[in-house]
Amino acid sequence: MDRNEEGALETEAAVVGGGLVALATAHALARAGLQVARIAPAPAPRPPGEALDARVYALSPGNVAFLRSLGAWRRVRTERVAPVHAMRIYGDDARTCLAFDAWEAGVEALAWIAEEAEVAAALRADLAPPVAGACLEVQFGAEAAQLRLDRGASLRARLVVGADGARSRVREAAGIAFCEQPYGQAALVANFECARPHRNVAYQWFRGDSVLALLPLPGDRVSMVWSLPESEAARLAALAPQPLCGEVRRASGAALGALVALAPPQCYPLRRARAARTVGPRVALAGDAAHVIHPLAGQGANLGLQDARALGEVLGAREPLRDPGDVRLLRRYERARAEDVLAMDALVHGLARLFAAQGAPIAALRNAGLALLDRLSVVKNLLARRAMA
Ligand SMILES: Cc1cc2nc3c(=O)[nH]c(=O)nc-3n(C[C@H](O)[C@H](O)[C@H](O)COP(=O)(O)OP(=O)(O)OC[C@H]3O[C@@H](n4cnc5c(N)ncnc54)[C@H](O)[C@@H]3O)c2cc1C
């Protein structure tokens, strides 16, 4: 990193954020030949020993290939990762089932379930430590952006990437509007031990106004993401471990037998949000800073990793001497991502609305749709391919 005459740090690209998206972006930009400075808080301490992180992601094969190309996936310990060999998605009645199988799709796994902390540590291993823990303010100028950092530090960068989550300070400083829409739902997240082996099947139940997912973890353990109306989520979050296990077992039709909670559940309010633009002069947004979607398809972090991939590709293909903060160049990234983000948001939002709608006729219609989809192999393959990108 260089210092200018006033002693301030100077770099080509500054990546703000400490999550998977920021870490992958820092790798992708370095691979594109840019000098990169990271601004990220210290990572949270990991749970001791064999205990699993509550934040668990279903990573698409496309993103696992991306992480592999960055050299990070080989650092993820195999015993901390579970491949998903099949998915079973149930409608309001147990007879309606949409099935996806890895062998049918001709892939090794439909997704890989991994803890955020494990993947983040793997990504951090080959990156230089952050230059600061927080970005307090950004001023965008014609020649460079000026970042005010914690502990009185400052940094000049030609490009600032805001991968700093839904409450992005970079987005705010760039004056980019963020349109938010609460779902009136919250997601309850917890890990369980299960009495019956999961056989690497990911289960999902769309029932009335809730969506329950049980994702396979290494060993006889599963990760739960249960999206529910806020009041119901709060009621379940307040239950003692045993009654909570009973509720999850009932809602899952006892598919995995008796459950034992491995830690108290965590509760996340759910919303849909979208930045009006994902780029501007000297700024690009990635991950939740640019778009937040319902977690029912487990695609939020996947979209963010695809952003990192696309931004790296655009900057890697830039003409020699081209300013990385040039908005005309950055628009190539915005265009490259627009369709995928829009399509995934529309699909996930449509499903969330369809299954939140009450009444017997709607339930019958959506179950018929699910059963029909299971028989339409072309549409089913298209859906699977999009989720695996
Ligand atoms: C219940 C639930 C389950 C989910 N399951 C899945 C799943 O299975 N698969 C999937 O793909 N997605 C899933 N998602 C979505 C996923 O969690 C998000 O899309 C993803 O975490 C977004 O990553 P991010 O790095 O953009 O943002 P974040 O994870 O929010 O990270 C933002 C980072 O920026 C840092 N930061 C913020 N402000 C500053 C600042 N001023 N200076 C420096 N750093 C800053 C924060 O500390 C943090 O490190 C789920 C979401 C929920 C709510």
Image: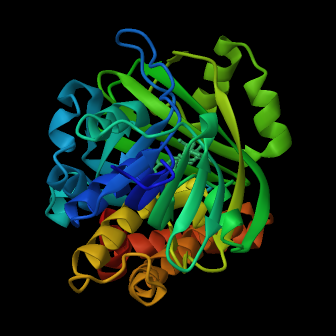
Question: In the image, what residue occupies the spot 56% across and 40% down?
Answer: 225
Where 253 sits versus 274, above or below?
above
Q: In this view of the protein, can residue 90 be seen by the observer?
A: no
* Residue 2 or residue 321, whichever sits in front: 2
On the image, the x and y values in percent for residue 338 come to 48, 82
**Seen from this angle, which residue lies furthest front?**
5
Q: Residue furthest right?
A: 231
In percent of width and height, residue 41 lies at 53, 35
Q: Outermost residue, bottom direction?
A: 328
Q: Is residue 356 above or below residue 43?
A: below
Identify the image quadrant of residue 77. top left
For the point 73% across and 54% down, the residue is: 209
Residue 365 position within the rendered picture, expressed as x and y whole percent measured from the top left: 64, 75
Q: Which residue is rendered at x = 14% and y = 63% of the image?
A: 106
Q: Is residue 58 left or right of residue 352?
A: left
Q: Nearer the viewer, residue 244 or 386?
A: 386
Judged left or right of residue 144, residue 177 is right
Q: Nearer the viewer, residue 117 or 18?
A: 18
Q: Nearer the viewer, residue 335 or 341?
A: 335
Q: Residue at x 23, y 67 (%)?
A: 32
Residue 19 visible within the image? yes
Kindly indicate the quadrant of the structure image that contains residue 328.
bottom left
Residue 356 in percent (x, y) is at 73, 61
> Above or below — where is 260 with respect to 143?
above
Q: How is the image coloured?
A: rainbow
For the C terminus, the image quarter is bottom left
Is 276 placed left or right of 325 in the picture?
Answer: right
- Quadrant position of residue 375: bottom left
Number of callouts in the render? Answer: 0
